[in-house]
Amino acid sequence: MKKVYIVSHSHWDREWYLPFEQHRMRLVQLIDDLLELFETDPDFDSFHLDGQTIILDDYLEVKPQNEWKLKKYIQEGKLKIGPFYILQDDFLISSEANVRNLLIGLEECKKWGSPVKLGYFPDTFGNMGQAPQILKQSGMEVAAFGRGVKPTGFNNIVIKDDHYSSPFSEMWWEGPDQSSVLGILFANWYSNGNEIPVDKAGARLFWDQKINDALQYASTDHLLFMNGCDHQPLQKDITKAIEVANELYPDITFIHSNFDEYMKALKQDIPDNLHTVKGELTSQETDGWYTLANTASSRVYLKQRNTDVSRLLENIAEPLATMAYNDKGEYPHEMFQFAWKQLMQNHPHDSICGCSVDAVHREMMTRFAKAEEVGKFIQSEALNKLAEQIDTTHFPDESHPFIVFNTAGSAKTGTVEIEVEWKRLPFSNGRPDELYRELKEEKLPAMKVIDEQGVEIPARMIHTDIRFDYDLPKDRFRQPFIGAYVLVELELDQMSPLSWKTYALIEGVPQQNKYVSIVQNNGRILENEYVKVQIESNGTLTILDKSTNSSYTNFLVFENTGDIGNEYIYKMPKGDEAILSSAGNAKVEIVSDVVSYGEVLIIQQMVIPESADESLLEEQKGLIEFRERNAGRSKKLKTLELKTKIRLERNSNQLLFETSFDNQMKDHRLRVLFPTGIHVAEHEADSIFEVVKRPNQVNTSWENPTNPQHQHAFVNLNDELRGVTVANYGLNEYEIIDDVIAVTLMRAVGELGDWGYFPTPEAQCLGEQIVKFAVGFHGSMDKLESYHAAINFQIPLSSVQTDIHQGDYPAEYEFIQLEGNAFRLTAFKQKENSNEIVLRGYNLTAEKQPLSVLYKGKCPKRGNLLEEIEKEVFDSKQITEEEICTFIWE
């Protein structure tokens, strides 16, 4: 007998086509209605609170007096919560942010009751390939999702070996490590049971259609109907509607139910012929238009700020705090949780994707700033606390010691700038203006940098500064002073992961080391022992990778096209042709030519239309679907000047780029192109807990002329002899066009899109823009080194000045001994509410790889993603393919 499970819910986007507070007030009304219904209708089984616990916080900030009611009904099972903190976008937040969303969500659930053990992804814009492994390691066996798989119906033929479609709404979902969970696809969307009629005539029409729709895809007699939709008000007469349905269809049982009950029944009757979908689910079998991948380039400034704050919390503040407070019991758990919550409030799919109204994204910038300031505070406190524990007694009495930290998970090469306080005059010494003048008139001596053995280290004194500053002691009032500062630049080569080195600035004449200039031919050539770069007259680069003797031409071409799409989807106007920077000439200026690096500036001008033509606005207001629009680009032209700094460091084969421009144009897209000459079927990209392999060619059903994809730190093309890795900083969209790696630098559009007309003038991204990216090269044996360099492109070195004192730690130290080139570190932190040290990461490859990880000579224990110990010791010295690893030291 068929059984219909009706689950009441409301998919609650915190912010979208209305600002957050507008949506919140409607949320308050919804929950008030729920609390009343729980009291008055005993047949109302429960309400699914959209899988996110933040809804409880949002409500209670307005009505804190109802906390006891919420707790009562959660514990009674009437209100179903969790397991997540927010409903995130999988692809645009980091691996760790996906985990923290689960950890914090489950921690919040403990305060209230029990979570729903369901990986609930109703409207994420595609689903990450490692979701099965993440869920399995978190004690969940089922995932429910609305996008990514094409339902074909069990009477239709499914393409053999097709991993992205299913005849059933139920399927097995397998991750790259072979982890598998039961997948539930909302084949008829998560509103297939919305607004069920109570009158018999209406109910008959409704259920005849809806049941037929569900039966097209159902693999069992258990039929799921989701009673709700986006911001859907509560259907108060739902139990009456169910009574009517049971009267009309005596051969079907209709119940008001919940996911726990539905999943239990479904698992018991799963047939043997379920299809298996594998890896990322990004609508690969569709026409390619509504994959929504272009949200990766909507409002790029949001993605850049998200990278700022994510790297600060994950890769700087947490590792420093872990080293500083490793056995002190002072780890700032509450501060980190506050910062993470602020950051994650920007991670829902309509927020971080940049596909909401302008007011939403203005508020996001405030949240980024709040999380960042907390992260900076923790970083500063941890640096000072850690510096107190590092012995600096080997340095001369009159020296000024400072410590450099590599908090990344692999060795880091590059330059670092440290500002060293040379002298200070406290306000107690006199009037501030006199103190300032005294230091200003004092001639500073020649200076040099030494290590703890007294050996001079090549360094450059960039400039000095005299300015006001202050200390905030923990035991007395603030201490203002006028200080003299020296900005010192050091070059570090292969600094070990999770380590530090101590140096000191002292008085003395530095050695004048002879060196071969990296910059040649008036700035037109950059060359070190690894690569030679020639800047052509049109601004393109011709590059020789000396390690493989491979040449690359026409690198660094900027491409501009029109965009008459929206915040979700890029659409090039009909008949539009790309405008390329290589069509003009370029000026080259030398910025720096020093021992450790060479840097030049390329200045280019592109003449492009100022906007779309006037018909676009009428098409938008008339709700013409973007694919049917006929708008073109304006005949009015403006000059877009691109200024690109290119830096080549002495000990690196990675070229560093920073492009700045003042965008005063609308309705367009700017990309940078790297034609590699590498013609292969697949490429690799940095994704969530995996380096994913994606095909370069689209499916035969694909109609979209473009094939946008998501990335985090890098994208790579390689063959058996050579490869090119393009790194980025907050530039999450790329496309592979034959042998070309195209990275989107900015997309400027004027409307939200989707179900109505919502103008978004701030999505045009007018004003000054700065984007950063890098290009590295590798041979057949050093691809992983290229990947680590790309990852470290986003993680700066940290530093702190200290004094001369005794300490328990030596001046140079590896806090964790980490050996394994295929291992990528994602977290080094303390376990929530504990002093236990947690180190997490994953295998960058699809093969077993060696790994050794020690803390004070001790092997860790193996844990899961909930940071629960599962094995008493990690002594196998290897990790399996695509494995996510959590290590714990008690």
Image (cartoon, rainbow, N blue to C red):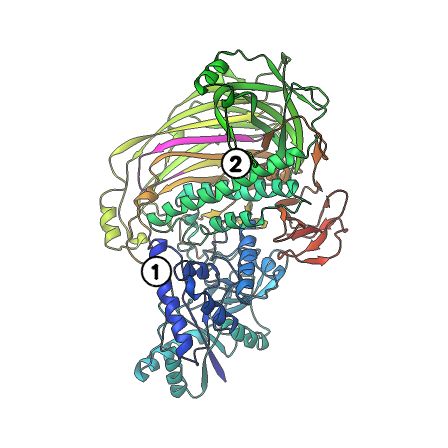
Say whether residue 663 is magenta: yes
Q: Position of residue 483 (x, y in %)?
A: 51, 22
Task: Give the residue type at disc 2.
Answer: Thr
Q: 699 or 255, which lies in front? A: 255
Q: Residue at label 2? A: 676
**Magenta stretch secondary structure, dominant:** strand
At a point 44% along the width and 57% down the height, the residue shown is: 701
At a point 53% along the width and 37% down the height, the residue shown is: 726
Contact (Cβ within 8 Å) of mark 2 with mark 1: no
The tally of labels here is 2
Say whether residue 18 is magenta: no
Q: Position of residue 193 (x, y in %)?
A: 40, 73
Q: Position of residue 514 (x, y in %)?
A: 63, 13
Q: Residue at label 1? A: 25
Magenta range is: 653-670
Q: Position of residue 646 (x, y in %)?
A: 49, 27
At a point 72% along the width and 24% down the height, the residue shown is: 394
**In the displayed structure, does residue 24 sit left or right of residue 809?**
left
Q: Is residue 384 visible?
A: yes
Mark 2 vs mark 1, foreground winner is 1
Q: Quadrant of residue 177?
A: bottom right
Would you call the spot at circle 1 few (<14 residues within 10 Å), some (14-19), or many (20 or more)? few
Would you call the spot at circle 2 few (<14 residues within 10 Å), some (14-19), or many (20 or more)? many
